[in-house]
């Protein structure tokens, strides 16, 4: 698996900050109390760059169910996570997982897309599109992890300290994702 890096330009970051400011800080289910809005928008921007299509209008109720409509009316919800240590990533990324929190399983999307974005003390620098999977396939293949359970991959290959899941969630290794890019 080779992952393409998407560099965030100053213009992209400004547009993302503007879009993030339109999202309520008290977003339902937000672990970061609205602090992940910019990360989420950057993930959507990468999804748009890879998949094409259109972002869902932030003024409609469906914004909670999916982020982008692309191709043949496919509705995809982009899931974005950040990482803070630059690594020789192509080999380390194979250890990454994708997850959906258990409270968030009722979204009415067709697919999930997954992105990772690098952040340092001065802000977000770049992101990777990891791939996508149908909602049905995700939940059929994912493992359920309980809050407080240790991630069995944490600490492997210099991936950092032990990690314990902060909430109940469904977890899937990125090797199950479809990395193909629609034509």
Image (tube, helix red, strand yellow):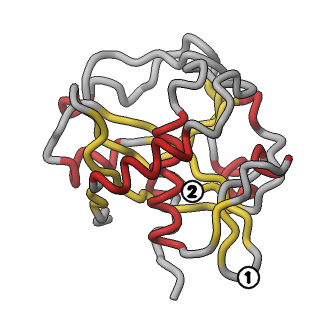
SS at mark 1 in the image: loop
Residue 150's x, y, as percent? 47, 17
**x, y (%) of residue 176?**
52, 58
Q: Quadrant of the N terminus?
A: bottom left
Q: Going by the image, does 92 lie left or right of 145?
A: left
Q: Which mark is residue 175?
A: none
Answer above or below: position of 88 versus 153.
below
Measured Cα–Cα span from mark 1 to mark 2: 16 Å
Q: Quadrant of residue 25?
A: top right
Q: Is residue 88 left or right of residue 1?
A: left
Q: Which residue is mark 2?
A: 113
**What residue is drawn where x is 66% and y is 81%?**
71
Q: Tell me if label 1 and label 2 are in contact, CB under 8 Å.
A: no
Between 31 and 8, the one lying in front of the other is 8
**Residue drawn where x is 17% and y is 38% of the image:** 86
Splitting the image into 4 quarters, where does residue 32 fall? Answer: top right
**129 on left or right of 52:** left
Callout 1 crowding tier (Cα within 10 Å): few <14, some 14–19, many ≥20: few
Residue 42 left/right relative to 10: right
19 w.r.t. 86: above or below: below
Residue 161 vertical placement versus 40 (above, below): above
Categorize mark 2 by other alpha carbons within 10 Å: few (<14), some (14-19), many (20+): many
Residue lying at 73% horizontally and 71% vertically, measured from the top left: 74
Q: Which residue is at the far top?
A: 148
Q: Which mark is residue 72?
A: 1
Locate residue 36, reporting x and y percent.
51, 31
Q: Whole-percent x and y of residue 34?
A: 59, 25
Residue sitting at 64 percent across and 69 percent down? Answer: 54
Q: Give the secondary structure at mark 2.
A: strand
Which residue is at the far bottom? 183
Among the two numbered marks 1 and 2 on one chain, the one whose residue lies closer to the N terminus: 1
């Amino acid at each position: 698996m080779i992952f393409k890096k998407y560099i965030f330009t100053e213009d992209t970051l400004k547009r993302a900050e503007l879009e993030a400011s339109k999202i309520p800080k008290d977003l339902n289910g937000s672990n970061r109390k609205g602090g992940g809005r910019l990360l989420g928008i950057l993930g959507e921007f990468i999804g748009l760059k890879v998949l094409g299509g259109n972002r869902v209008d932030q003024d409609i109720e469906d914004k909670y169910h999916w982020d982008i409509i692309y191709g043949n009316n496919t509705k995809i919800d982009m899931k974005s996570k950040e990482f803070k240590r630059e690594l020789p990533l192509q080999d380390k990324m194979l250890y990454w997982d994708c997850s959906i929190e258990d409270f968030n399983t009722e979204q009415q999307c067709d697919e999930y897309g997954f992105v990772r974005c690098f952040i340092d003390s001065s802000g977000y620098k770049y992101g990777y599109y990891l791939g996508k999977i149908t909602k049905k396939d995700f939940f059929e293949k994912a493992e359920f992890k309980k809050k407080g359970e240790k991630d069995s991959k944490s600490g492997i290959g210099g991936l950092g300290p032990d990690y314990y899941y902060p909430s109940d969630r469904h977890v899937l290794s990125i090797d199950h994702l479809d990395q193909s890019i629609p034509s």
